[in-house]
Image (tube, rainbow, N blue to C red):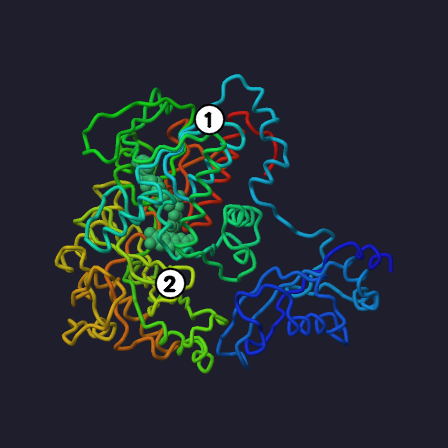
Amino acid sequence: EEGSAGREAGFWRLSKLAVPARVDPGKDFTGVSPPLLQAIAKALKFPVSSMLPEEAFSVIRKSFDARKILKEPQFVYTVDVDVKKLLDMEPRTWDFIARLEPKLGTIEYMPDEKVASDLISMLHRQGSVNNGSICSQQKKPRVAVVGCGPSGLFASLVLGELGAEVTLLERGQPVEKRGRDIGALAVRRILHSESNFCFGEGGAGTWSDGKLVTRIGRNTDGVQAVMKTFVHFGAPPNILVDGKPHLGTDKLVPLLRNFRHHLKELGVTIRFNTRVDDLVVEGRKVKGVVVSDSRLQLGSPNQALSFDAVVLAVGHSARDTYSMLLRHNVDMTPKSFAVGLRIEHPQELINDIQYSELAAEVHKGRGRIPVADYKIVKSVGEGDAELPEQNRSCYSFCMCPGGQVVLTSTNPSELCINGMSFSRRASKWANSAFVATVSSHDFKPFESHGSLAGVEFQREFERRAAIMGGGNFVAPAQCVTDFLNNRLSVTTLPPSSYRLGVRPSKLHELFSSHITEALQQSIIMIEEEMPGFVSSEALLHGVETRTSSPLQISRNTCTYESTSLQGLYPIGEGAGYAGGILSASVDGMYCGFALAKQLSLFHGDI
Ligand code: FAD
């Protein structure tokens, strides 16, 4: 009794509440609908769902589940019950609440509501901004953050909020100008080597699908703080509830503009078109950076700037920066990643495969059900440790439903691709990377490049792809059926969303036979699981190489400082500590706090 009474003030979290898709108001509705009330009543064992007050419940997560093992597709909810509110509004629920028992994975009791706040409110609440210890410091520590991608932005935000004098250095352009440069690439085939799909404000993920999924745990404090900060800067609040949240390029661009304005208000100096070409190092300690105007030719005048610390958030396409770090003997080691091809199907075909009857509704574009996606992982090989080149994991990666294939090269002699979409995911195509893991034994031919062996491995296939495409950024392509049969596609290729054109090519000859065979075997396995995936309408595009960083820059786990150069803080995807927008943001955020502690700007625990 006492226990139950104590629970009056708390919350119950009910998970796995299923509502059939045919009666649910649809993917964008995050309120409490009558069918959801019925599912809640069932979980509470309360007889009359219409007597439950909607206001006592809040939807925490909503996902769509159309797996074939289910009787019918459904939306699956997690809902928090505010016990006090519920009892105030409907006292007859008391007996039912008192009888609730925690059940692993479906019913959980929480004394308090779990509400992580956005980073800015959190910092303001801590009282560390403007009136905290920092302002008493006579001289603010000067920090350079190199790279304006998610990791660099979040590191700048935390350090700026905590009172450091931050200078954010970005080789690319602000999003407005970057958008025009990307337009020139798509329409006039002009590749700006410093302003493209990889370089510029927002980093690599700006002209992307903006999927906000991560393997580091959606409910962790770090991820929640980052997601809420996105909402603070203008992202739609339903990303906090959606089981597979995504933003799309059209939502990312204004978000980044708001982020920039906030940083400027904090006093962060942002320098676009400013490439860091070198570090100023004295006695294994970084004292500053050497920058040049990225719009001018290499070798143009440069400028040395001094800083107390340098946060390196350059992403995985800054190969010149990697070479510069190697010259300074910074500890880096090659790391496994994955390479492959991008496969594209008509979106309707994927809807048909994944949704069966429900596909008809999606085709009509009513927007109630999300367009279908897929996620596939297959292992090939016998697991024989003696033959590592034959054991690989093959998986789909960065799937963009309703998206398009885009060019992510930073150099005209190399060709690599990726995928992006707009928030409505309304294009006719569904594309996804289909990749196989590669590791040190694959990089053996490039061993002479030391820690950059993986980078050279990537570059080799990007060069081959550019040659296969015949130049002008035309992508080599092959029907999936021909790829499986090792033959050139002789019939007309199916249409592609890739705007710079495709050329029939022998993609089965692009990689080593071990990689090609692994990809082929796993495509055959997928066909068994998703009949129709191997179709004459499915087109493979080459080449997908930049799935994650090909190396890791060693750093201290607690301080984030490089193990070989004092004052250098390597973060994000380029340093090998993140694999997407969310994880890079979280890494940047925590580095910001760790560095702020070392600079005596922050004394709390995060
Ligand atoms: P980056 O975002 O790469 O940012 C690095 C920044 O540093 C760049 O702006 C660059 O210009 C700058 N820079 C580099 N060198 C220098 C230098 N020497 N001097 C000054 N500035 C420099 N992830 C997801 O989670 N979801 C997705 O849907 C998704 N889709 C993607 C689609 C595309 C087309 C691409 C290319 C990537 C996508 N990603 C996606 C991956 C995601 O973008 C990255 O994981 C993420 O951006 C990494 O963040 P970062 O801050 O570590 O580096």
Quadrant location of the N terminus? bottom right
Q: Is mark 1 within 8 Å of ligand 1?
A: no
Q: What amino acid is found at the position of numbered circle 1 in the picture?
A: Glu
222 or 553: nearer the viewer: 222
Indicate whether 345 appears above or below 574.
below
Residue at left offset 33%, top offset 35%: 272
Tell me if residue 595 comes above or below residue 356 in the rendering: above
Rendered location of residue 94, percent (x, y): 83, 65
The image quarter containing residue 74 is: bottom right
Vertical placement of 418 versus 121: above or below? Answer: below
In-front residue for pair 329/426: 426
Relative horizontal placement of residue 286, taking residue 259 as reference (left or right): left
Residue at point 29% right, 77% down?
535
Q: Residues within 10 Å of mark 1 (few under 14, many from 20)?
A: many
* Mark pair 2, 1: CA separation: 39 Å
Q: Secondary structure at mark 2?
A: strand
Q: Nearer the viewer, residue 116 or 451?
A: 116
> Position of 238 compared to 32: left or right?
left
Image coordinates for residue 477, horizontal then vertical, percent: 20, 66
| Residue position for label 2 | 400
- Beta carbon of the mark 2 residue lies under 8 A of ligand 1: yes
Question: Tag 1's secondary structure?
Answer: strand
Q: Residue at x 56, y 41 (%)?
A: 119
Q: Residue 271: image x %, image y %?
A: 35, 32
Count residues near mark 2 (Cα–Cα under 10 Å), then give few for <14, some for 14-19, many for 20+.
Answer: many
Q: First in sequence: mark 2 or mark 1?
A: 1
**Residue that badge 1 annotates:** 165
Hey, which residue is sitting farthest top in the picture?
A: 138
Percent across and percent down for residue 559 are: 49, 33
